[in-house]
Image (tube, rainbow, N blue to C red):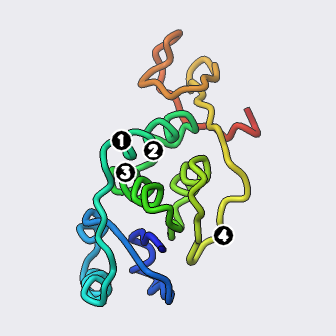
Amino acid sequence: MHVLDTSAFIHEYHTQAKKASIPLVREELEAEHAFRFDAMEGAGMYIHIPDEQSVETVERAARKSGDLAELSDTDIRLIAAAYELEGILVTDDYAMQNVAERLEVTVEVIAQDGIDQQRDWKFQCQGCGRVYDENKDRCPICGTGLTRKNPSSA
């Protein structure tokens, strides 16, 4: 089963496989893209609502990888749906791909290149330059905000 992200409807993704999505994706779509969602739903696309335990599993994986702040509630619930359904997540979103692959959810990209490796992001203080494994609102040493940093350059 292919679990479709918003980008699948925007880029007119087609597959003969069974399709699924979540109600929050429909809320993100407008005009003709929303019509595509409605048409697929009318043609038998399964609408899934993941359980809270799966959502928490995805949030833990995203927190561990450093992607949690980059993911919307829709993103998290889509990954959770693909995880529960043992489906293929169809998305162009890099943070979603990173988290999905950590959970051994297969990903299919549409219009972008997929990620080439999983990442555990680091967070660097813009004031004192210290690097942290977890994101915080402020640096505990100097109080300056943190930004996400590519771990290969950390």
SS at mark 4?
A: loop
Q: Is the residue marked by circle 1 packed among few (<14), some (14-19), or many (20+) residues within 10 Å?
A: few
Instruction: Please name the amino acid that badge 1 sits on.
Output: Gln
| Sequence-earlier tag: 4 or 2 | 2
Instruction: Report whether residue 69 is seen.
Output: no
Residue placed at 45% from the left, 21% from the top? Answer: 138
Question: For mark 2, what is the residue?
Answer: 58
Viewer-proximal residue, 153 or 89? 89
Q: Is the residue marked by circle 4 packed among few (<14), some (14-19), or many (20+) residues within 10 Å?
A: few
| Sequence-earlier tag: 4 or 3 | 3
| Sequence-earlier tag: 1 or 3 | 1
Residue placed at 31% from the left, 65% from the top? Answer: 48
Instruction: Please name the amino acid that badge 3 sits on.
Output: Ser
SS at mark 2?
A: helix
Residue placed at 42% from the left, 72% from the top? Answer: 4
Give the spatial CA distance, label 1 vs label 3. Answer: 17 Å
Please tell me whether residue 80 is drawn above or below residue 119 in the rendered image: below
Residue placed at 40% from the left, 51% from the top? Answer: 76
Question: For mark 1, what is the residue?
Answer: 53
Question: For mark 4, what is the residue?
Answer: 113
Asked if labels 1 and 2 touch by Cβ distance under 8 angstroms, the answer is: no
Please tell me whether residue 152 is drawn above or below residue 130 in the rendered image: below
Viewer-proximal residue, 81 or 85? 85
Question: For mark 3, what is the residue?
Answer: 72
Asked if labels 1 and 4 touch by Cβ distance under 8 angstroms, the answer is: no
Q: Tell me where residue 91 appears, x and y as whole percent.
A: 50, 68
Give the spatial CA distance, label 4 vs label 2. Answer: 23 Å
Instruction: Report whether residue 6 is seen.
Output: yes
Give the spatial CA distance, label 2 vs label 3. Answer: 12 Å
Instruction: Please name the amino acid that badge 4 sits on.
Output: Asp
Give the spatial CA distance, label 2 vs label 1. Answer: 9 Å
Q: Tell me where residue 129 appears, x and y as whole percent.
A: 64, 22
